[in-house]
Image: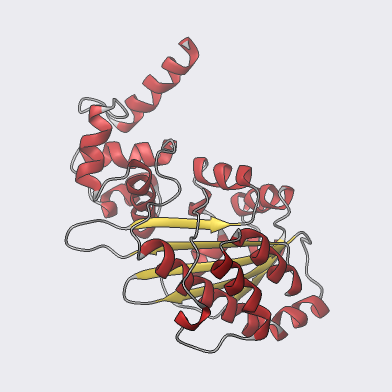
């Protein structure tokens, strides 16, 4: 679920001064070299091992939200995160998606006794994502989360203070990467990298409910999730299907047999399970 970011014309395109530690990132873009390698180097200089950028574009009169994700974490983790709908329980997202909060420094204690969150954090740690910091950005067109992570599951007080002292630099990295991404990917009309990827079971359920006339609020109540989480599922499935809105998503899914006008979501799930056993 990675997007290729193309070279830019020059570093002078950036509207504000760039600190020295971020010059290699801009130089990499200028020279057309892969961005992941230089971002990973910057992230390690800041004391972390991985980087993830997620952006949800705002809804307009013509199209629903779309979702983009870019990262240096293992691709297998991004696929598992997507297919198992971890967005619903990821404490970093739950903390910062509705409002614009201060940065979140987190470790295994963020679960606060919630068994589902504890299981999610254990799976994340198996991919080297045991703790870290999440930065949140907002503008008129998008919601953004940038997360830097490391393998340690419990942060010492000394480590927390070290992250705090680096927060300004981390926020600068987040804002610069967002500027680059909007300019070089969104501004050029490049499709989200997950276009063409299979829909998750949760996304299929949301789409099937929508085909029966239910709103995101209705779907959230039915599935026991928040309305904004249902909206995220639609943003992701719309990105995967390469359509403008949920009406086009429903039509596309019906044509390709992903959902049925006659099935309820429960019937759809049972039918797919039976089909999977036969194949």
Q: Residue at x 30, y 40 (%)?
A: 207
Answer with left or right where residue 141 lies relative to residue 126: left
Residue 235: x %, y % from top left:
35, 53
Residue 135: x %, y % from top left:
55, 74
Above or below residue 199? Residue 246 is below
Above or below residue 24? Residue 118 is above
Answer with left or right where residue 21 lies relative to residue 211: right
Answer with left or right where residue 3 lies relative to residue 164: left
Which residue is outermost to the top?
278
Q: Residue at x 41, y 61 (%)?
A: 185
Answer with left or right where residue 116 lies relative to residue 197: right
Above or below residue 173? Residue 202 is above
Residue 170: x %, y % from top left:
63, 78
Q: Where is residue 167, by image quadrant? A: bottom right
Q: Where is residue 35, by image quadrant? A: bottom right
Foreground residue, 203 or 179?
179
Residue 14: x %, y % from top left:
47, 81
Q: Residue at x 45, y 80 (%)?
A: 13
Q: Is residue 47 visible?
A: no
Above or below residue 76? Residue 275 is above
């Amino acid at each position: 679920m990675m997007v290729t970011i193309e070279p830019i014309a020059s570093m002078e395109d950036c509207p504000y001064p760039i600190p020295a530690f971020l010059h290699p990132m801009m130089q990499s873009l200028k020279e057309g070299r892969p961005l992941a390698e230089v971002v990973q180097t910057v992230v390690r200089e800041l004391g972390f091992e991985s980087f993830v950028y997620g952006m949800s574009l705002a809804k307009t009169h013509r199209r629903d939200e779309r979702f983009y994700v870019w990262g240096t974490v293992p691709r297998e983790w991004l696929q598992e995160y997507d297919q198992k709908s971890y967005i619903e329980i990821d404490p970093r997202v739950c903390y910062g998606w509705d409002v614009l909060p201060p940065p979140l420094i987190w470790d295994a204690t963020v679960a606060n006794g919630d068994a589902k969150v504890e299981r999610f954090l254990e799976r994340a740690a198996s991919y080297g994502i045991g703790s870290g910091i999440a930065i949140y950005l907002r503008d008129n067109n998008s919601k953004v989360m940038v997360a830097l992570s490391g393998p340690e599951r419990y942060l010492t007080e000394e480590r927390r203070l070290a992250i705090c002292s680096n927060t300004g630099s981390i926020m600068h990295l987040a804002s610069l990467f967002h500027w680059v991404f909007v300019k070089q990917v969104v501004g050029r009309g490049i499709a989200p990298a997950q276009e063409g990827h299979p829909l998750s079971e949760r996304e299929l359920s949301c789409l099937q409910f929508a085909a029966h006339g239910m709103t995101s609020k209705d779907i959230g109540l039915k599935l026991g999730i928040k309305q904004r989480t249902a909206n995220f599922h639609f943003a992701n499935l719309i990105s995967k299907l390469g359509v403008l809105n949920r009406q086009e998503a429903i039509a596309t899914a019906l044509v390709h047999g992903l959902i049925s006008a006659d099935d309820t979501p429960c019937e759809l799930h049972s039918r797919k399970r039976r089909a999977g056993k036969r194949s």
